[in-house]
Image: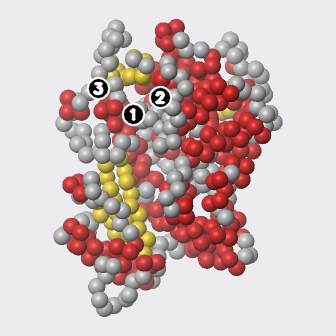
Amino acid sequence: MSTYCDENLSFSPACNLSPSHDLRLSKHVHDNVHGNIYLDPLSLKFIDTEQFQRLRELKQLGLAHLVYPGAVHSRFEHSLGVYWLAGEAMQKLKTYQGLELGIDRFDVQAVKVAGLLHDVGHGPFSHLFEREFLPKVLNSFKWAHEQMSADLIDHIVDVHHIDVESEMIKRVKEMVLASSEFALPKSAKEKQFLYDIVANGRNGIDVDKFDYIVRDSRACGLGCSFDFHRLMETMRVLGDEICYRAKDYLSIHKLFATRADLYRTVYTHSKVKAVELMIVDALLKANSYLEISSSIQDPSEYWKLDDTIIKTIETAPDEELRESRDLILRIRRRNLYQFCNEYSVPKDQLEHFKDVTAQDIACSQKNGGVLLQEDDIAVSNVRIDLTRGRQNPLESINFFKDYESQEKFPIPHERISHLLPTSYQDMIVRVYSKKPELVAAVSEAFENFQLKIYGVKAQVHATPEKKKRRF
């Protein structure tokens, strides 16, 4: 492996990595979150491929850097971080319960590679590609980056002739898909706890979150009081699942609460969403010409798609891309879609809530004045939860009393604190005007929509007059 470095990562000379080997002689990365990350030979074979190196061109937080300038870290760093934490988690379990659980080198290697490759199939601009863009062009066809990760793992092994057991790759793909709707039947009837480490479909506590919560908070200059080290040190396998000490209940709640706070303040910031809406429109207008969405059918083409698609559109002279170029130019010049207002869906309406559309708002305008068209309006329906929708994720977690006890049990939230929330999901409806001169008309139509649906204006306050006059 050639030596390379950037402002966050530096690689040192390689050597075979084994449990007894001197780590100082191993190839390693100096990461700004976890310190030295030591890389095993098999993982290096995956890292030194163009498909994995593509992750350098995918910003972890998509377009959030346009609001939080420090949020320029990539999925490359995150993937190395998850690889390292997956290995650390396995080492903890092996140290304390290795003989009891029958953990072997195959298990350790599979979990580490799954951590490394869990995001290799991720699309551009964080989750925008699969959640906002693809649904508008694929109709009812379902696609998830986890499935593409599994497809790309096979592709990388085939193209680069990586010498790895087929059973290992099968297990890795199962772990990568474990928390997605494309989850595969687990081939291992025993050691089901291994699937809880990288992508935990059982209760959502996994090393993926451990890494991105700390990494994203640091990049955005936000404080983070959640400490994953405590959970990794004290976790224990009981009945083939990872359980936690009852005294760590509030630490686990802090994990989910910190994630929800990042969603509210960073990932779904109103300005970040404004830029995302514009990028989605730019991609939609360019799709028929560039055939962007067709790449998801073929891993050999998909790996070429990354965040630089915007620079490709921006600098292309083709007339077919003019509308997309104009939108990107507006972003560069900070002439964004204008945020008009928002409201939080009443708690008693959450169960039957249907996404609000631009058509809903356009149809709520009163006669007279400016005639709004559906294409003048953009709507963002923002869901923020604790990973389990309207359910409390802690109800899916089992705890234990102490290390002498073999009993595992759930803990009802009311037995811990009456200060904890009793609602576990927020649904926020935000409306934007694509043209500054239409802010007042869109805001009025949005208020009319609220009155029609709820009988009251659910928004906190009216759109500021200054914003209505800003054009």
Q: Indicate the secondary structure of the residue bearing disc 2.
A: helix
Residue extending furthest toward the right:
2
Q: Amino acid at mark 1?
A: Asn
Comparing 452 with 271, the one in front is 452
What residue is rendered at 30% in x and 39% in y?
Answer: 392
Q: Quadrant of residue 245?
A: top left
Disc 3 to disc 2: CB gap under 8 Å: no
Q: Amino acid at mark 2?
A: Asp
Left or right: where 114 falls relative to 235: right
What residue is rendered at 73% in x and 76% in y?
Answer: 318
Q: Indicate the secondary structure of the residue bearing disc 3.
A: loop
Instruction: Measuring from the top left, give residue 179's x and y in whole percent.
Output: 47, 38
Instruction: Measuring from the top left, give residue 228's x and y in whole percent.
Output: 45, 30
Q: Residues within 10 Å of mark 3 (few under 14, many from 20)?
A: some
Residue 24 against residue 404 in the figure, above or below: below
Mark 1 — residue? 203
Left or right: where 97 falls relative to 105: left
Mark 3 — residue? 410
Left or right: where 83 falls relative to 273: right
What residue is rendered at 37% in x and 51% in y?
Answer: 384
Left or right: where 294 falls relative to 260: right
Q: Earlier in the sequence, mark 1 or mark 3?
A: 1
Q: Indicate the secondary structure of the residue bearing disc 1.
A: loop
Disc 1 to disc 2: CB gap under 8 Å: yes
